[in-house]
Image: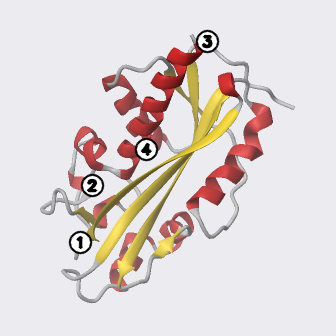
């Protein structure tokens, strides 16, 4: 069985999604963090579950014996609350691959009254304390009537956040998006935990 040997003062972001990692490392570089962030592209086992937390925890446990050191899994979902009742939610990755942004737009009638949100959750294995802990992030908004913007990824081109109502996520710079996004929030919560517990362990 492959074991990834740990590097001192390093925490691993287990993901094959380079866009996710780019957003994570952007936050890390602008914050005072006692750990370096490195990407590990290891295949995880993903289940279809009712909550993002269940999915993230299962993914974490599926690679726990393959990594030596602290690491985390981040899982996110796109929820169209009105008019789709939260769809695609935990099925976001599959829906993006099958019908994409175009398919979602075809399901929306009144774009102005639409409501949507992104949720993210991190499941962290923190080796110094031998614990698994969770952090979450959330941002609300609505659906754009058209695909707009060249930045971001996934459903970013059709999501307009309430806090910047004139632009989609894909029309924001990486830094602008991280200031308000579900992923920016959850990474900052992770960093706060790392700062606090690193000082305790020292």
Q: Name the residue under label 2.
A: 170
Could you say where residue 121 lies in the image, as x and y percent from the top left?
51, 51
Q: Does residue 61 sit above or below 140 in this rendering?
A: above
Q: Residue furthest front?
A: 200
Q: Which residue lies furthest to the right in this view?
A: 1
Q: Is mark 2 on a helix, strand or loop?
A: helix
Q: Which residue lies furthest to the left in this view?
A: 166
Which label was assigned to residue 8? Answer: 3
Residue in view at x 23 percent, y 87 percent: 110
Mark 1 or 3, closer to the camera: 3
Q: Earlier in the sequence, mark 4 or mark 2?
A: 2
* Left or right of 176 in this view: 15: right
Q: Is mark 3 on a helix, strand or loop?
A: loop
Which label was assigned to residue 78? Answer: none
Could you say where residue 96 lies in the image, as x and y percent from the top left?
48, 67
Q: Which of marks 2 and 1 is nearer the N terminus?
A: 1
Query: Disc 4 vs disc 3: Cβ atoms closer than 8 Å?
Result: no
Q: Earlier in the sequence, mark 4 or mark 3?
A: 3
Residue in view at x 28 percent, y 89 percent: 109
Q: Name the residue under label 1.
A: 144
Could you say where residue 91 lies in the image, as x and y percent from the top left?
56, 69
Which label was assigned to residue 186? Answer: 4
Cα separation, mark 1 vs mark 3, equals: 45 Å
Residue in view at x 33 percent, y 79 percent: 105
**Which quarter of the figure has residue 126?**
top right
Q: Earlier in the sequence, mark 2 or mark 3?
A: 3
Cα separation, mark 4 vs mark 1, equals: 24 Å
Mark 2 or 3, closer to the camera: 3
Cα separation, mark 4 vs mark 3, equals: 23 Å
The 10 Å Cα crowd at callout 1, few under 14, some 14 to 19, many 20 or more, is many
The 10 Å Cα crowd at callout 2, few under 14, some 14 to 19, many 20 or more, is many
């Amino acid at each position: 069985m492959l074991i990834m040997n740990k590097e001192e003062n390093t925490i691993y972001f287990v993901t094959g999604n380079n866009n996710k990692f780019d957003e994570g490392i952007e936050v890390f570089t602008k914050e005072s963090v006692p750990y370096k962030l490195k990407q590990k592209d290891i295949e995880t086992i993903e289940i279809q579950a009712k909550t993002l937390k269940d999915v993230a925890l299962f993914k974490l446990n599926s690679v726990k014996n393959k990594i030596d050191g602290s690491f985390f899994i981040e899982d996110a979902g796109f929820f169209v609350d009105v008019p789709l009742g939260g769809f695609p939610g935990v099925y976001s990755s599959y829906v993006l691959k099958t019908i994409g942004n175009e398919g979602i737009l075809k399901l929306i009638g009144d774009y102005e009254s639409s409501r949507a949100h992104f949720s993210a959750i991190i499941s962290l294995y923190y080796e110094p304390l031998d614990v698994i802990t969770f952090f979450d992030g959330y941002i609300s908004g609505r659906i754009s009537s058209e695909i707009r913007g060249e930045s971001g990824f996934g459903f970013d081109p059709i999501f307009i956040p309430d806090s910047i109502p004139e632009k989609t996520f894909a029309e924001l710079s990486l830094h602008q998006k991280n200031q308000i996004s579900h992923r920016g929030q959850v990474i900052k919560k992770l960093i706060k935990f790392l700062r606090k517990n690193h000082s305790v362990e020292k």
